[in-house]
Image: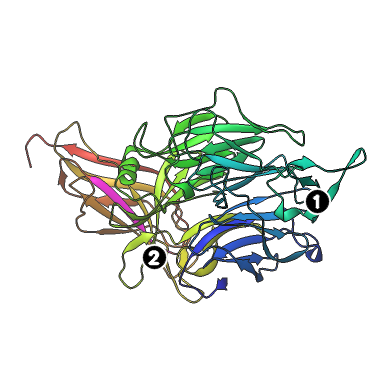
Amino acid sequence: MQIADSSEGCQGSFVASVGLDSNRNVPDAFFVVNSKVFRIDYRWESHEVGSIATGSHPTFAETGGERPLLLIADGFNLWYYDLKNGGSLRSIGLPNKINQESVAIKPASVQVVAGSIIVNDVGSGYAYYSIPYPLSKTTRKVLRIVDGQVQYDGLNPIYDNVDSDQWVFRDDYGVVQYKNGESNSDSINGLYAIGPNLIVFGPKSVEFWQRGSAEYETWTRTSYTFNREIGLDATNSISSVNNVVCFVSNGMNSGRAIFAIDGTEFSKISDTWLDDILDKSDTDNIIGFSYSRSNHSFYGIYIPNAEGKRDRTFVYDIVTKEWSERSSRNPKTGKDHAWNLVYPVWFNNKTVFGHLKDGELVYLDDTHFREELNETTSVPLIRIRQTPVILNNYQNFTLDEVGVEMNCGTIDDYEVSPKVQLEVSEDGGYTYGNTVLEECGKTGQYFYRVRFLNLGMQRLCVIKLTFSEDMDLTLTNSSIRVTPLTFSI
């Protein structure tokens, strides 16, 4: 589905919990392409609702309450959209910086906890917040203040009506509400809410805040939750799956790495090889995303120009705790680059992704084994499995047989004889020798055995299997038969 004719890719996505009254409140999805915000309804029809700052990767939140609104922070402005009544994006009045007169804050991250809207200010250590549900009405009554004094009519204070969207971050006295980190003077470069907890990220620290339930309660740091050895390195890398928040950390504690926060517990989930790639890459434009499929939950990162070479995408399976690389192929050059898909959401019973390089929306289909480049062109989906380095107690050996247990005989096309490709590397996986093809059973040949024989003499080797047929691939086991050698090769 194409929602915009653009050479720029998706910049963000969000699924609201409610939709327009005219659509029986069926939830809508929102995607940002080329800095334009599109609403996607349940009929898969797109509607442009406004524009945000050029080139930004916005954050989203939803207010809830009797007047549910979508909030979008783009690093310069804070926007809102009426989820039930529709219309277009409208801006929220921003207060001036608490430490700099006549300069408005620049919110890049917005979250809502207990009805209170909270944003950061780019480059500062202050967060600005509202009373609960400040936008539940279009207007709001505030105290009339003259020369710093509340005005009275006899014994009764005088109230004025103001536009609620211009008074969000002020209390009824007109005082700007803000808070900074309690444990150090680190700037705030990210916010993420999980239930009643707000995770407050800085380049050198992470804190956990909570807010009281009363109207004028402030935010407080929860006890024993400050971590000053880990900070947020890539501001767009934050994403959560099953209430586990993942992000790319800085290098203060263990070099650049990927950490997960479950509750208030931190754990490192990236392997050393991925840490090395992060250390050699510019992390400013890394994008983090998450999604779930078939009882598995995934956290992915897109790394532009990884190690100064090419764009790459890596995905972590929360269940198996294994990393894999996802890639797309340039049909003209045949070379792999980063996966074309970013910013997935669960919408209309589908896992829907934005496209990295254009205005297309795509969804995952477990029965479709080709990658759609656009609405008219597709290429085979290449699946690669690779072993670690294989040794035989540091002795030379002949690689007599590699057996692969897989779903043979399941291809739908009776005329096709599907094949698996095997390659062997003798230098740890840097280069590979000649390819070997082996059939994996025509339709109905369920007991077909996939065996590669007489693969030569080795001291160490890496085996790579490649599969690109139009069918599912399920590898259940494998076996290797070798003969040790008593002489050098």
Q: What amino acid is at disc 1? A: Arg
Residue span colored magenta: 462-469
Which label sits on residue 459? none
Reading the image, the residue beneath label 2 is: 417
Q: Vertically, is 213 above or below 293?
A: above
Callout 1: few (<14), some (14-19), or many (20+) C-alpha neighbours within 10 Å? some
Here the colouring is rainbow
Residue 455: in magenta span: no
Where residue 75 appears, as percent x and y from the top left, is: 53, 54
Secondary structure at badge 1 equals strand
Q: Earlier in the sequence, mark 1 or mark 2?
A: 1
- The answer, for residue 212, to whether it is visible in the render is yes
Tell me which residue sits at (42%, 50%) in the image: 406
Q: What amino acid is at disc 2? A: Ser
Quarter that holds the C terminus: top left
Quarter of the image where one finds residue 346: bottom right
Residue lying at the far right of the rendered structure = 154
* C-alpha gap between disc 1 and disc 2: 71 Å
Magenta span: predominant SS is strand
Where residue 342 appears, as percent x and y from the top left, is: 49, 57
Tell me which residue sits at (68%, 55%) in the image: 70
Residue toward you, 184 or 31: 184
Quarter that holds the N terminus: bottom right
Tell me which residue sits at (38%, 49%) in the image: 283
